[in-house]
């Protein structure tokens, strides 16, 4: 059973990874790379005019891939999906960039109502950021190993979420029963957004148990 199969837990873990302590195999500690890619992800969803639901989904997938890539280099937590260990010397900076790059390039075409020009701009943002990130990493075996583990972790996450129904097309009909909240549709209200979202495959099947365990450690119960 994989630990922390929730968006919240993954984001917390990834933020923590920005301050990952140095290890003997590392050339330099990770600085703001995770934060930088978080900003890039939101640049992508902004330029493509995606709502907060789509943006959070794409960014969560990216952070899960980054988390598992870093965890493969320096194992501190149970993996979310990618379990193999990276070869000694793999550079985390390269792993972060590769993981984020693979996820974002893959999810951009899945965005709903995507304008071709917006799509091209989004891809350009990601490619330029990736090129800049790798330019700052020393050439050598460590860089290549970091890229490899980042790409592998990203592909594992993408495969896991491939058919999660996030883009399913449904015929949405609001309920009319008592206690059911019904949207009021006027002439300018437009269609409901992401009506298939409740049917999306869950990120975790044991959320309550994991949260309870974490709270128990914090509050000593």
Image (spheres, helix red, strand yellow):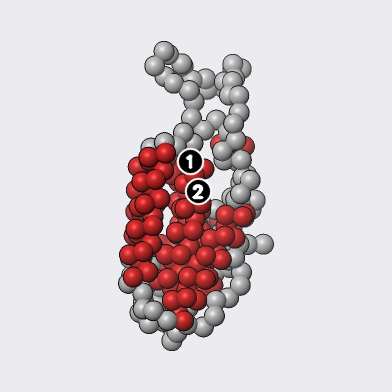
Q: Disc 2 designates what residue? A: 107
Foreground residue, 107 or 176? 107
Figure quadrant of the C terminus: bottom right
Above or below, 127 against 53 in this view is below
Q: Residue furthest top?
A: 187
How far, Cα to Cα, is label 2 from label 1?
A: 7 Å
Quarter of the rendering containing residue 3: bottom right
Find residue 112 and report its horizontal and vertical position in percent: 49, 36
Please give the label number shown on residue 56: none
- Near mark 1 (Cα within 10 A), the count class, few <14, some 14-19 or many ≥20, is some
Foreground residue, 193 or 203? 193
Find residue 136 and report its horizontal and vertical position in percent: 32, 72
Foreground residue, 210 or 88? 88
Task: Say left or right for 140 vs 217.
Answer: left
Quarter of the rendering containing residue 116: top left
Q: Residue at the location (42% across, 13% down)? A: 186
Find residue 170 and report its horizontal and vertical position in percent: 61, 28
Above or below, 73 against 39 in this view is below
User: Quick check: can you spot residue 143?
Assistant: yes
Q: Residue at the location (63% across, 45% down)? A: 163
Q: Disc 1 designates what residue? A: 111
Above or below, 27 against 95 in this view is below
Asked if the residues shown at circle 2 and circle 1 are in contact, with their CB atoms under 8 angstroms apart, the answer is yes
Tag count: 2
Foreground residue, 83 or 153? 153
Q: Does dot 1 land on a helix, a strand or a loop?
A: loop
């Amino acid at each position: 059973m994989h630990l922390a199969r929730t968006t919240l837990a993954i984001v917390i873990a990834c933020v923590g990874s920005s301050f990952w302590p140095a290890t003997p195999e590392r050339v330099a500690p990770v600085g703001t790379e995770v934060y930088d890619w978080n900003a890039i992800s939101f640049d992508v969803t902004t330029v493509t005019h995606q709502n907060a639901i789509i943006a959070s989904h794409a960014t969560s997938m990216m952070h899960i891939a980054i988390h598992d890539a870093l965890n493969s280099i320096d194992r501190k937590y149970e993996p979310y999906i990618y379990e193999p260990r990276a070869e000694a010397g793999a550079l985390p900076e390269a792993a972060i960039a590769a993981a984020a790059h693979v996820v974002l390039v893959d999810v951009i075409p899945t965005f709903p109502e995507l304008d071709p020009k917006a799509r091209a701009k989004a891809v350009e943002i990601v490619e330029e950021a990736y090129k800049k990130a790798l330019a700052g990493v020393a050439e050598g075996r460590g860089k290549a190993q970091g890229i490899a583990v980042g790409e592998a972790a990203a592909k594992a996450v993408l495969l896991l979420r491939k058919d999660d129904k996030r883009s399913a097309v449904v015929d949405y009909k609001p309920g009319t029963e008592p206690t059911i909240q019904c949207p009021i549709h006027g002439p300018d209200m437009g269609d409901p957004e992401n009506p298939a979202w409740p049917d999306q495959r869950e990120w975790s099947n044991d959320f309550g148990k994991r949260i309870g365990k974490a709270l128990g450690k914090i509050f000593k119960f």
